[in-house]
Amino acid sequence: MRAMDVQRFGARIAAGPRGRGVITVPFDPDEAWGAKAGHPVGGSINGRCVRGTVTPDGRGWVFTVTPMWMRDTGVAAGDDVIVELAPEGPQRGDLADDIAAALAANPAAAAFFDTLAQFYRKAYLRWIDATTRRPDLRAARIAEVTDLLAAGIKQRPRSRGPAEGTGPAYDDVVDLGRYPVNAPSSPAYRHLVQTCQEQLRRHGVAQLTGFLTPAAVTEMLALAGQLAGQAWASDQSHTVYFEPPDDCAGPDHPRALLQHSAKKAIAFDQIPPGAPIRRLYESDDLTGFIAAVLGKPVLYRSADPLDALEIAVFSDGDELGWHFDNSEFSVTVMYQESDAGGHFDYCPGLRTEHDQNYPGVQKILLGGSDGVTRLPASPGTLAVFRGQHALHRVTPVSGPRPRINSVLTYGEHPGMKLSELTQRLFYGRTA
């Protein structure tokens, strides 16, 4: 953000509807930043990062924070705070001359551009700027974007014409040079599958570091920040088997010992169709690749409108307690590690189909570390993990920077969905 755009002021947080906090903005953002119906902004409150929109309320302008943000930061209604806000870029003044001129010539497009969140502005601009090798396309793309904006369309449809080439719809998301998941008949693809299968056999997990491009990771982090206010916060106790505790088993038995899990989940239907991870998840190429790695003849993407694909956010104090997965495998993509904590620990092969190994499980639950492996996960890493027989957890997160990743859900049968009860448990609603 540019220093000249930053507005710093003191305020008192008022109680808003549904547990929200409301801050009265003591300046006119139309005068400070240019006239708009609403002003998408980023900044801080008492030094804690915040994003949102400054909106009119009939008497002036206000900025609203979510109950989850207030809980995570320890801020409450009635608190006096120091606020710094600035418009989220890019602003029209930051645009290339040809793009700025096109918007200036089309007031409807310019006005709609001003209302867009940073994620959507950058997506349009990246598509225009991707014409470095084809400068003849730039003017055509600027004209198309201007028309879309004038029509009130915040995201460009993903259809591809001949002029755009024949690459997959996710070719900006995956490092296809290292991981050619779009070329199943190639020797490089077969070698990649064999390497992943060997990792799974030896370690119970296959990791592809740098699978997502840095640009895709950055875009997903921006999107997670913008959608954080819509995330459902769950906080529950459970056994490692996700079954009711067995009070007859004894207080230290694995079927009686309770674990704690807490996180925020952004559901599939909240992730825009053009988001990098959604374009990747909805590709048949990735589905086929995951099936090949697991040695499955076919896999299907989940049909659940909430659980098919999620963004999981672990803030300060959040964790996943020790547990076994009910499903045979899971697929995740890492975007950001936390400041401290948030480590993925697992015990491969701790149980089998024929032996629950209660003594071994009990030792881990009571604090033992023999056989526990800590799995590093840098941003952009895709992991395929066999968690049905491997006890695993995410350790408590500490610090202001959250741990953020996505979970991609597949199954061996079409039409797979959660029950309404489970949807409410993990997402707070049904769909």
Image (cartoon, helix red, strand yellow):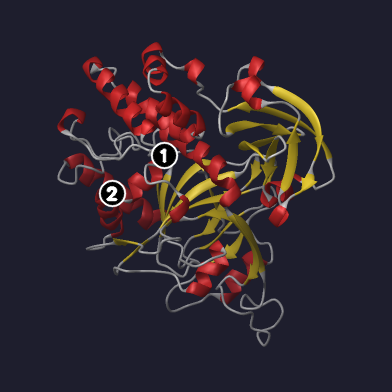
Measured from the top left, where is residue 271 in percent x and y?
Answer: 45, 48
The residue pinned by badge 1 equals 209
Residue 107: image location, x then y, percent: 42, 24
Residue 75 visible at all: no
For marks 2 and 1, the one nearer the N-term is 1
The quadrant in which the N terminus is found is top right
Q: Position of residue 285 (x, y in %)?
A: 25, 48
Whether residue 312 is situated above or below residue 429 in the rendered picture? above
Figure quadrant of residue 166: top left
Tag shown at residue 37: none
Of residues 118 and 201, which is closer to you in this image? 118
Q: Is residue 94 left or right of residue 403?
A: left
Asked whether the viewer can see residue 196, the reply is: yes
* Kind of residue at badge 1: Thr
- Determine the residue positioned at 29% across, 62% down: 300
Q: Quarter-wise, where is residue 297 in the image? A: bottom left
Disc 2 on helix, strand or loop?
loop
What residue do we see at 45% from left, 32% from top? 112
Q: Position of residue 338 (x, y in %)?
A: 61, 42
Q: Is residue 382 above or below residue 328?
A: above
State the SS at label 1: loop
Q: Is residue 7 above or below residue 373?
A: above
Q: Residue furthest front?
A: 58
Q: Label 2 to label 1, Cα distance in Å? A: 20 Å
Q: Which residue is mark 2?
A: 283
197 and 337: which one is in front?
337
Vertical relation: 136 (above or below) 406: above
Residues 278 and 125: in front is 125
Q: What type is the residue that disc 2 sits on?
A: Ser
